[in-house]
Amino acid sequence: MGSSDAIRVPGAEIDFVLGAADDPETVDDFDVVVTLDDGTRWSAGLLTMGAIQRIMDRWATTGEAEGGDFFQSDDLMILRRPGVPFATDLLRRLAAAGQIQYTLRQLHDDD
């Protein structure tokens, strides 16, 4: 079971969903829900290239995704660096620029 840590930035609240063993400074595979001040909610899975490579390597042995030959996600955001601090800064900048709704997937009441 994961934990959830919300951070307030101008225009939005960012809720990071971390696993119990995740270190916020180095986590490279986690989810986020951003609630804008207008009440709309937006989500993404945040991964680094290294995290994607590890997943695909694991799938090569388990047979998932045609033996790890592809990776697909409808709400993926690839990060250059790991960690909640980096993701917070990035999402703060996106919120300030009015880009959250063009970058993340909108959640609805049934999500």
Image (cartoon, helix red, strand yellow):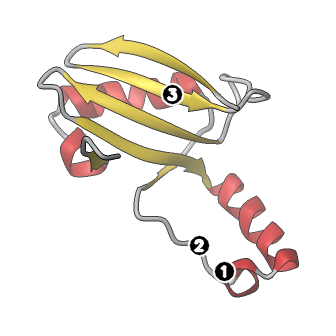
State yes or no: discs 2 and 3 in contact (Cβ < 8 Å): no
1 or 2: tag closer to the N-terminus = 1
2 or 3: tag closer to the N-terminus = 3
Query: Which residue in the protein does label 3 denote?
Result: 16
Disc 3: CA contacts within 10 A as few (<14), some (14-19) or many (>=20)? many
| Position in image of residue 108 (x %, y %) | 24, 45
Q: Secondary structure at mark 1?
A: helix
- Residue drawn at x 63%, y 30% is 18
Query: Which residue in the protein does label 1 denote?
Result: 65
Residue type at mark 2?
Phe
Disc 1: CA contacts within 10 A as few (<14), some (14-19) or many (>=20)? few
Location of residue 33 (image quadrant): top left
Residue type at mark 1?
Ala
In this rendering, position of residue 79 left or right of residue 109: right
Q: Secondary structure at mark 2?
A: loop
Determine which of the numbered discs, if any, sits on residue 50 in the image: none
Q: CA distance from mark 1 to mark 2?
A: 7 Å
In this rendering, position of residue 20 left or right of residue 15: right
- Furthest residue in direction front, as rendered: 110
Query: Which residue in the protein does label 2 denote?
Result: 71
